[in-house]
Amino acid sequence: IKSNYSFLNYKKGKCALFMKKLILASSSPRRKELLEQIGIAFTVLPANGDERIESNDPETVVRSLSHQKALEVVSNNNFSEPSLVLGADTVVAYNGQILGKPKNEADASKMLSTLQGNTHCVFTGLTFIDTTTHLVTTYCCKTEVTVSPMSEVEIKAYLHTGEPMDKAGAYAIQGFFAAFIEKIQGDYTNVVGLPLPLVYQHLKNATS
């Protein structure tokens, strides 16, 4: 029986889709942890170039930035074997306004005050570039997140954890902030930074 999958070091939890090598164009530890969680073998080649944003629309922004990251890695490297380069970008948006990473603690406090008691959206753009066929495929995943009402004391306590400072929207759903998540509509892993079901299905279809 032929299989599209090759399981390498299965006892160690490593799985490889044998026909295509996955290249992650991101140094995000959260994205690396998510791929490792489902045993996907991959190599990290982070994009480091300047990001050009020409829109205020969250979906347009993440699609564009994910494409820029993947394209940079493809353009700057020579691949000796068939590979899929994955670029990703995640933003938090409330009422259509993008909330990036906070500049300082006061900025983080303002973001958390905006999100508490309300529902916001998390968008992740994914771009796959096949280094053999040069086929470019871009997706956008959207998840709605409802945050419980938070008091000023709770916001200050969360700020003191230091967790908000390098996170889009000033929170990490997989960290202390999980205590304040009232409801999620959509993919949880998308909020962490990489929608795993979408990634897996693309890899499966691209290597079948």
Image (cartoon, rainbow, N blue to C red):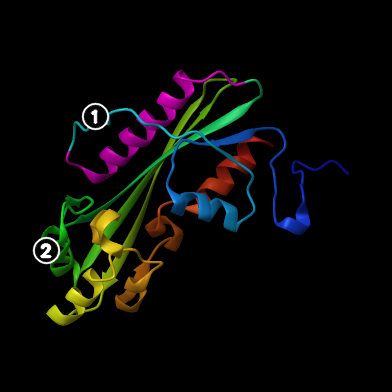
Tell me if residue 146 can be seen: yes
Tell me if residue 151 can be seen: no
Picture coordinates of residue 30 (x, y %)? 45, 54
Q: Amino acid at mark 1?
A: Arg
Q: Quadrant of the C terminus?
A: top right
Instruction: Write down the quadrant of residue 187 in the picture.
Output: bottom left
Q: Nearer the viewer, residue 203 or 107?
A: 107
- Which residue was labeled with disc 1? 52
Marker disc for residue 110:
2
Marker disc for residue 117:
none
Picture coordinates of residue 110 (x, y %)? 11, 63
- Residue 46 falls left or right of residue 38: left
Q: Residue at x 32, y 72 (%)?
A: 177
Magenta highlight on residue 109:
no
Q: Are marks 2 and 1 in contact (CB under 8 Å)?
A: no
When the figure is inspected, residue 7 is found, relative to residue 75, above or below; the finding is: below
Label the magenta part by its dominant secondary structure. helix
The magenta stretch is 56-79
Picture coordinates of residue 26 (x, y %)? 44, 40
